[in-house]
Amino acid sequence: MTEKLLEIKHLKQHFVTPRGTVKAVDDLSFDIYKGETLGLVGESGCGKSTTGRSIIRLYEATDGEVLFNGENVHGRKSRKKLLEFNRKMQMIFQDPYASLNPRMTVADIIAEGLDIHKLAKTKKERMQRVHELLETVGLNKEHANRYPHEFSGGQRQRIGIARALAVDPEFIIADEPISALDVSIQAQVVNLMKELQKEKGLTYLFIAHDLSMVKYISDRIGVMYFGKLVELAPADELYENPLHPYTKSLLSAIPLPDPDYERNRVRQKYDPSVHQLKDGETMEFREVKPGHFVMCTEAEFKAFS
Amino acid sequence: MQNIPKNMFEPAAANAGDAEKISKKSLSLWKDAMLRFRSNKLAMVGLIIIVLIILMAIFAPMFSRYDYSTTNLLNADKPPSKDHWFGTDDLGRDIFVRTWVGARISIFIGVAAAVLDLLIGVIWGSISGFRGGRTDEIMMRIADILWAVPSLLMVILLMVVLPKGLFTIIIAMTITGWINMARIVRGQVLQLKNQEYVLASQTLGAKTSRLLFKHIVPNAMGSILVTMTLTVPTAIFTEAFLSYLGLGVPAPLASWGTMASDGLPALTYYPWRLFFPAGFICITMFGFNVVGDGLRDALDPKLRK
């Protein structure tokens, strides 16, 4: 757990729009350790998905570095080098209805990575690999020649997982992989992801807004607010001892199926003015306890630690 | 009902694999669309009309006693009879044969213009939409400028510069015709390039050509096909219109347009000289339009059950 797989240093992703610059991701720094699951939570539009997509180079980062095994992913790269990164880093998408090409058979979808990286020498080998992958994600071999529209949401999401696994990645970015599925299927997909992690030693960046699901799958959790990371801590620590007022606010919003608790639950609102920033002072990301980082002012830092 | 003893029940064999089984026959989206097209009666009528006209255009002149260019002044301007089903024109040529020879030329012009539009439009539109930014801006402004010049003016100018003939007509029509196709393809590409399956392919390391021709163009094929089908009747009609301006195919070749324009002065005395070619222009345009509409309905994913 101590080996860093991914280091993100001062990652910035700004989009220029006619109405000014949108700072979708603003100066983000964190590490992901080998074999862990890092959960990333935050409200809609806070830059979670953009972070994931910038890491995997779907967007060209405005500034900052993403080091994978010590090597920068961004910047000018030869095609060979890029293909290498593409094999090691994969992504699972949010919408199982939009993430599979409706004109291709399941076999062609799953084998796309094999085709691009020329991992299968013969047609037979390619088909065999597709069958293996289908079985890995709990689908039938006979499904290979069908089209995506014939499957349910959960089945499609598993096809998406099989496609990502085809190139034997080390690191998978799961961009809200379960938010489009109904609850019974969510557990199925999350458990499949957990099993695969154990089996293949995968590392996950799990982006979601369902806090209970994130707690279930993550080792550590990062909380994002307006393009910035405000708190990063081990999962249990974050739930038991939230420090940043925004994290407290998020946690206070989780409903429980318990009428007594629900009647007394007070939802806290987050108001950035509680930090009482002095003129010229900025918030910084500080380590208050080993492994527990909070975005805070100097005064708060003293109070926390 | 209550009297059925318990021992008559037998638990069904539980088979883990069965849970994921899909019993419906596998259907690709194309097959699905074809099924829907076939249940559309009007479109099927249109398709039958087009097939019949094409078959007649190919075979009728081969098996006729008459030749489309041999004149026989003794037999001029005869009304439809047993010998000449559609009558004869002012030079005694059989109108039945000339109609089908004209069909060859009219349909050839229509189809050739549609195919050329397709090639140029798809390439121009997909590059413009996919590259985006400044490339898109420049390419679309060029199209806008061409679109702004009255197409008739451009066609007439071209006909003056180029030698008179079939290919000049086709080129003249393509020079403005492709813009419509390019705009439609660009719109589709803009919409499709941010689909998650395209992003997924990108994270797997696909090249631009793969993204375009494996993912984007096949999914835009529906609109492309519909546009193409609707281009054919427009081209046939434009050709007829050019014939009236004296810019049609040179004699003794016949197209429906030149035949109709030759027949017009004699309308009061020998109406069949105008009626047959004009009638076939109408029927063919009807056929292609109905088939185009039918295709649009059949390929519209929103209508899928």
Image (tube, rainbow, N blue to C red):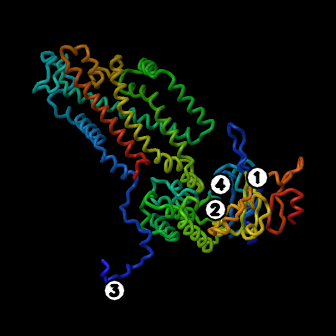
State the mark number for residue A64. Answer: 1
- Please state which of residues A291 and B252 is positioned toward the viewer in this rendering: A291
Foreground disc of the pair 3, 1: 3
Q: What's the residue type where badge 2 is placed?
A: Asp
How much space separates mark 1 and mark 4, taking CA atoms?
Answer: 17 Å
Vertical arrangement, residue A206 with respect to residue A195, above or below: above
Instruction: Work out which residue is located at the far left of the displayed protein and give it.
Output: B82
Vertical arrangement, residue B220 with respect to residue A217, above or below: above
**Which callout, 2 or 1, points at the residue further toward the start of the chain?**
1
Q: Are marks 2 and 3 in contact (CB under 8 Å)?
A: no
Q: What's the residue type where badge 1 is placed?
A: Gly
The crowding category of the residue bearing disc 4, from other C-alpha atoms within 10 Å (few below 14, some 14 to 19, many at least 20), is many
Q: Are marks 4 and 3 in contact (CB under 8 Å)?
A: no
Give the SS element for disc 3. Answer: helix
Residue corresponding to mark 2: A210
**Which callout, 2 or 4, points at the residue further toward the start of the chain?**
4
Q: Is residue A262 left or right of residue A158?
A: right
Q: Quadrant of residue B22?
A: bottom left
Residue A142, how many percent across, how many down? 41, 67
Residue corresponding to mark 3: B7
Foreground disc of the pair 2, 1: 2
Same subunit, tags 2 and 1: yes
**Residue in view at x 31 percent, y 20 percent:** B250
